[in-house]
Image (cartoon, rainbow, N blue to C red):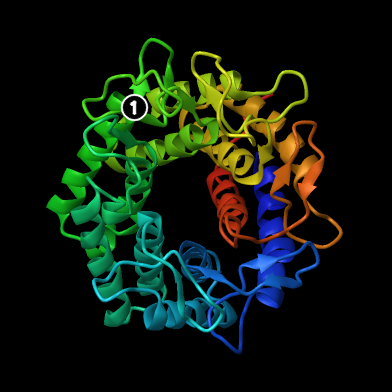
Amino acid sequence: MKNYSEVYEQELINNVIPFWMKHSKDELGGGYFNCLDRFGNVFDTDKFMWLQAREVWTFATLYHEQEARSEWLEMARHGADFLAKHGRDAEGNWYFSLDQYGKPLVQPYNIFSDCFASMAFAALYKADPQEKYAKIAKDTFYNILKRQNNPKGKYNKAYPGTRELKNFALPMILSNLALEMEHLLDKKTVDDLLKSVIHEVMDIFYQQDSGLILENVNLDGSFSDSFDGRLVNPGHTIEAMWFMMDLGLRLNDQKLIIKATEIALRTLDYGWDKEFGGIFYFMDIKKHPVQQLEWDQKLWWVHLEALVCMAKAYAFTGKNECREWFDKLHDYAWNHFRDAEHGEWFAYLNRRGEVLLPLKGGKWKCCFHVPRALFQVAKTLQQVAEPAS
């Protein structure tokens, strides 16, 4: 597995990060260009706040944890300056998107802009401990906690009092954000949040009968027999399970690590396309047709998060099944998503594994899942000892 560690680190440093360093920085308008084609050409200048923040996080984290390269810190500061100047409304909520020069385009309806902004400035504070970064991170974080029970607020399209559901994505994100923010928060806040999110993820959304995690449940945690209530997103589950493993490590809770590993393995088996390979994007827990037309696409982040999950599961448990899944995922991901010719990785494949959209950055893809996964796998497997032959 140490050989894998070296391969992933080299891919991060020599192939992926140079692509973003070369093509994404907007010297004129500030921040980063999000929409890049296969070759790195800008095909749209709109800027999406959660993607801007993710790129800040990436470069700040690499500077702090990988290597203190001045150009990485400068890149992180460049994006943070744009975010701090333009990213929030008067109430401190983060817009969804801006134009190239920072004028708002889409209202702050999506709390994930706030989550990743908080994460970005917390990471930048580690790399460059200026109080202004800590303040933005903490102000945003406490605003998230205030909004967590009604994250969309006035932008919620659902009719009140009928089918009110809660979504898996926010507790999943908070389980990671709590650790990302820990150096800026008091111990009680962190401990209370960790207890809450672990309960939500592992007890409320986890279904004991199927061994799977649902994307939406009723407010009381019960099953909703509807499109949204039957929805399973294998990638979300698998990503959340490595968050749970990190929390298990932080809390010295091996039972949590083992349970997360079991759920991840079950989800991989459930979500794997037995005919064409790769992991399905969306599934219906009752095997009904899903409403998402992209249900059978193979997405970059799903497979990269699965690689991180299996690397951690193998490192923390030593289970050979995790090693076998890592090998299988590695072969699929590197043979289908990686662009050896022009750098970075493709995002969207059809069910057969053929490139569907040749973009490298867009409304949903940025400098985040690929570099984070490469970094996490390299770091996780660096110290894994191979069993004696």
Residue 95, image x, y percentages? 39, 67
Screen quadrant of the N terminus: top right
Q: Quadrant of residue 259?
A: top left
Foreground of the two, 252 or 275: 275
- The mark tally for this picture is 1
Foreground of the two, 357 or 153: 153
Outermost residue to the right: 341
> Which residue is painted at 42% across and 31% down in the image?
215
Outermost residue to the bottom: 28
Q: Amino acid at mark 1?
A: Phe
> Which residue is painted at 49% across and 63% down in the image?
54
Residue 107, image x, y percentages? 39, 65
> Which residue is painted at 12% across and 51% down in the image?
188
Circle 1 — which element? loop
Outermost residue to the front: 159
Q: Quadrant of residue 359?
A: bottom right
Please indicate whether residue 30 sits to the left or right of residue 37 in the image: left
> Which residue is painted at 56% across and 41% down in the image?
305
Foreground of the two, 201 or 194: 201
